[in-house]
Image (cartoon, helix red, strand yellow):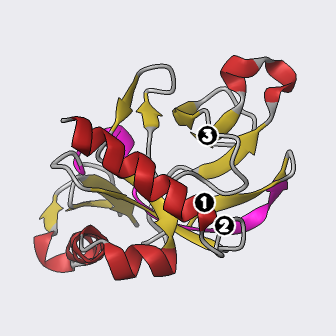
Amino acid sequence: QQQQQQQPQQQEQEHEQSGETGAANEYVVATTGGDQDEVVIRTLLGEYKHAGSNHGRNMFKKVIQRPGASSVDVFLYYWDNRDGPTFEGWWFGNKVGGTSVWSHNGSSAMAPPLSNWKIPWDGSVRPTLSVAPKTEQQQQQPQYQQYQQHQYQQQQPSNSVQLAVPVAGVSATVVGKVWELSQ
């Protein structure tokens, strides 16, 4: 168990020491566990692109995987210690500096840390969650390909079911676990 705890720390140190630190414009959030169907994990999983800066660090916004699908905005950003040490670090939230947040990492590194993300933000570290530059994620972690395949499967209309809706001119479709209404 100690080895498992040391491995993410070692990977994070290597990540911070690599030439990519602070330079990556795209990150991928992935999981190594069977938790990809949990609401918070599902919300965080995906690709993030550079979207500006906050408190001296780059910030990133989750890329919408399915155009037209309803989803919540997710930002990955750094917050300095201006509000106290408890709030310093990297955050996942629905807006930069907002009060609706899903995860926190107390690192003050220039780039988002690879591991040690707490879910909920004031809860326990979730060892299965990782954040890595997109190129690094593709090379080192097969769960990235599994995530992409999972996303692709959820986009397929073959899993759709048409239901009658008692409103004139409106139909409802279930795609995966999401209801989509159309006229």
In the image, residue 55 sits, relative to residue 162, either above or below, namely above
Q: Earlier in the sequence, mark 3 or mark 1?
A: 1
The answer to whether the residue labelled 1 contacts the one labelled 2, judged by CB atoms less than 8 Å apart, is yes
Mark 3–mark 1 Cα distance, whole angstroms, equals 17 Å
Where residue 146 appears, as percent x and y from the top left, is: 22, 72
Give left or right: position of 107 versus 44.
right
Indicate which disc, 1 or 2, sits on the residue closer to the N terminus. 1
Q: Is residue 88 visible?
A: yes
Label 3 environment density (alpha carbons within 10 Å; few <14, some 14–19, many ≥20)? many
Tell me if residue 75 comes above or below residue 141 in the rendering. Answer: above
Question: Mark 2 sits on what residue?
Answer: 21
Q: How packed is label 2: few (under 14 Cα within 10 Å), some, or many (20 or more)? A: some
Where on the picture, by quarter, is residue 107? top right
Residue 44 shows in the view: no
Q: Dot 2 lies on which element?
A: loop
Residue 33, percent across and down? 19, 50
Residue for point 34% across, 75% down: 140
Residue at image position (20%, 60%) is 176
**Which three-letter amino acid code belongs to the residue tagged 2?**
Thr
Residue on which disc 3 sits:
91
Secondary structure under the numbered disc 3 in the rendered image:
strand
Q: Residue at x 51, y 62 (%)?
A: 14
Going by the image, does 42 lie left or right of 26? left
Place residue 151 in its image quadrant. Answer: bottom left
